[in-house]
Image: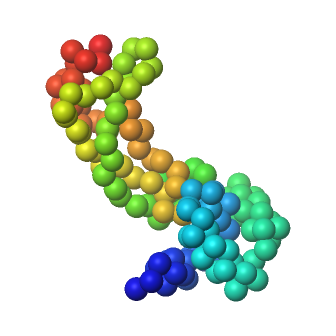
Amino acid sequence: MTRKNNIWQFLDTLNKYELANFYFYKYETFMENSQKIIDDYFLNKNMSKDKIKELVEEHKNMAKYEKYIRKDCCPQCYSLKKVKTKQLWCPLGNNGIAVQLDNERIMIDVEDCLICGYKFSNLNRPAKKDNWIIKLLKPDVS
Ligand SMILES: [Zn+2]
């Protein structure tokens, strides 16, 4: 499957508000080649940049008044679609600078919003169940 098919197939699964939020928040995070593919898709759907902004605003206003917004949704785009990935955990020392871990790479599960990329997990603060990591690293981080 080509890159274009992959992207277009993903975009086809989104509703108009998800599409607008996706473009609004995530477009800039893509490489130029992918941006071109995304541009083609929105052109094909007749969604101009003005239309995208309009939809993002409209959706925000709906979220203010309607009860359908769930507590566990993304605070930025109100989507419930999340993607789980593994990322390198980088603890911060007292000085706020990332602590260098000697040869040790701790991967933690993180959750991002699939639509806008909002990060639900703070990479500097492991979830409760990961507290053993803090104990393990105490000499470094305190
Ligand atoms: Zn989101």
Q: Decide: is 138 above or below 65.
A: above
The x, y position of residue 2, in whole percent, is 45, 83
Q: Is residue 114 left or right of residue 46?
A: left
Q: Is residue 1 left or right of residue 105?
A: right
Q: Residue at x 48, y 48 (%)?
A: 119
Q: Residue at x 25, y 44 (%)?
A: 107
Residues 3 and 63: in front is: 3
Residues 18 and 106: in front is: 106
Q: Residue at x 52, y 81 (%)?
A: 4
How was this image coloured? Answer: rainbow
Q: Is residue 44 left or right of residue 5?
A: right
Image quadrant containing the C terminus? top left
Q: Is residue 62 visible?
A: no
The image quadrant of residue 124 is top left
Q: Is residue 57 visible?
A: yes
Q: Decide: is 47 above or below 112.
A: below
The x, y position of residue 47, in whole percent, is 75, 77
Q: Residue at x 66, y 80 (%)?
A: 40
The x, y position of residue 117, in whole percent, is 52, 55
Q: Residue furthest front?
A: 33
Residues 90 and 108: in front is: 90
The image quadrant of residue 131 is top left
Q: Decide: is 54 above or below 47.
A: above
The x, y position of residue 125, in whole percent, is 36, 32
Image quadrant containing the N terminus? bottom left
Q: Residue furthest right?
A: 50
Q: Decide: is 132 above or below 67.
A: above
